[in-house]
Amino acid sequence: MIPISKPLIGEEERRAVLEVLDSGMLVQGPRVAQLEEAWAAACGTKYAIATSNGTTALHTALLAHGVGPGDEVITSPFTFIASVNSIIYTGATPVFVDILPCCFNINPDLIEAAITPRTKAIMAVHLFGYPCRMEPIVALARKHGLVVIEDAAQAIGAEYAGKRVGSFGTGCFSLYATKNVMSGEGGMITTNDAEVARKCRMLRAHGMERRYHHEVLGYNYRMTDLQAAIGLAQLMRLDEFVARRRANAAYFNAHIRNPGVVKPNAGCACSDCASARHVWHQYTVRVLNGGRDAAVEKLAQHGVGTGIFYPIPAHRQKHIVDMGYGDYRLPAAEQAAREVMSLPVHPSLSEEDLRTIVDAVNAL
Ligand SMILES: *Cc1c(COP(=O)(O)O)cnc(C)c1O
């Protein structure tokens, strides 16, 4: 079976981990500092702060901006639940705005109607590695005095209008094992704001700047040097990884010819998408006419693994409904949840794998 994702682990990663083990310094140390510097450089930001995972990056970033009880945070219902849970952890209320059918990201044209006097932040999720339409989002945030948080967990290296994601607001990344650049578990926050960076550093280490002087309620959200060593080896190969994902996606775009399968960004009329550069964390198609679940089974019979990201939109998840946050009708997100299917697009696919995937999709 061709897996939906596969981490590329080479000699560099092995050597880097052994070096840390041999150093005897396993906790947050020089490797974390190096990874932070390299990550900031990769995103074009002044600062990067490593955390234990993408969820704690989001939680820390929200807290650093003062998001808390009584606040509302606008986000997409079509995302991994961590985006939404991180808002709930702060005591704030998630407010869902429907998505664009072409790219599955939040629809900027619908955001303003959801802004209330309680709105504190907009969390833009760059889903599947495709950047949100940041120009209208940043303009709305300026107009209403809102914070912009980017959930860029799937999108390291993606660009919009010539700028890397994570540099438009406060960026949050994940280095979970299936992400484009991974460390097993890991997270990163990017910002150009020195005060936000300082608060994030405090929050991830029990609220202390001076040892055992705790100024605010913080957490243990630190990354270890073992993880950072893997992440560094991976980040050095970012351009290569992205180039391979782009080549794989270009192959699918050129060769998938099945009228029942809608390719990514098909029919997109957004004026600014020409400036967007995808990093293809997922290559996600829509299967029309209620055929999605049968397609998943048929592809599996042909040895092609698939993923459904995501089968239930956030506003329909049980815990969100139970908390009373789910009273929405968001037709574009609901339709996407019924139709989406992601194909393997990761860098370790062979030419034969690509042909197998295309043939199987065209035969659906
Ligand atoms: C992976 C992911 C996260 C959370 O990252 P973890 O490292 O798994 O905690 C958050 N948001 C999105 C969109 C993700 O894909």
Image (spheres, helix red, strand yellow):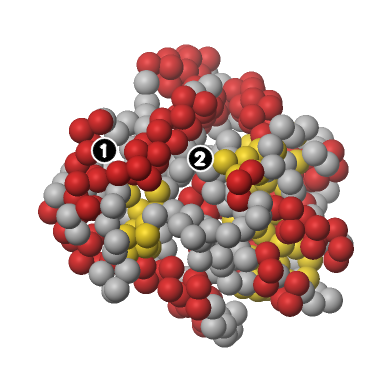
What is the secondary structure assignment of the residue under circle 1? helix
State the CA–CA distance, disc 2 to disc 1. Answer: 17 Å
Q: Quadrant of the C terminus?
A: bottom left
| Residue 122 shows in this picture | yes
2 or 1: tag closer to the N-terminus = 2
Residue 77, given in percent of the width and then of the height, sits at 55, 69
Label 2: how many residues lie within 10 Å, few (<14), some (14-19) or many (20+)? Answer: many
Q: Residue at x 85, y 66 (%)?
A: 144
What is the secondary structure assignment of the residue under circle 2? loop
Q: Residue at x 29, y 74 (%)?
A: 290
Q: Residue at x 13, y 53 (%)?
A: 301
Disc 1 residue type? Leu
- Which residue is under mark 2? 279
In this rendered view, identify the residue nearer to me: 110 or 197. Answer: 110
In the rendered structure, the answer to whether residue 123 lies left or right of residue 181 reads: right
Label 2 C-beta lies within 8 Å of the nearest ligand 1 atom = no
Judge whether 43 appears above or below 118 on screen: above
In the rendered structure, the answer to whether residue 106 lies left or right of residue 176 reads: right
Judge whether 168 appears above or below 111 on screen: above
Residue 87, given in percent of the width and then of the height, sits at 65, 64
Residue 309: image quadrant is: bottom left
Residue 198, given in percent of the width and then of the height, sits at 80, 40
Judge whether 241 appears above or below 191 on screen: above
Residue 145, given in percent of the width and then of the height, sits at 86, 62
Disc 2 residue type? Val
Question: Contact, CB < 8 Å: mark 2 with mark 1?
Answer: no
- Rendered image: mark on residue 354: 1
Judge whether 98 appears above or below 259 on screen: below
| Residue 165 shows in this picture | no
Residue 136: image quadrant is: bottom right
Q: Quadrant of the N terminus?
A: top left
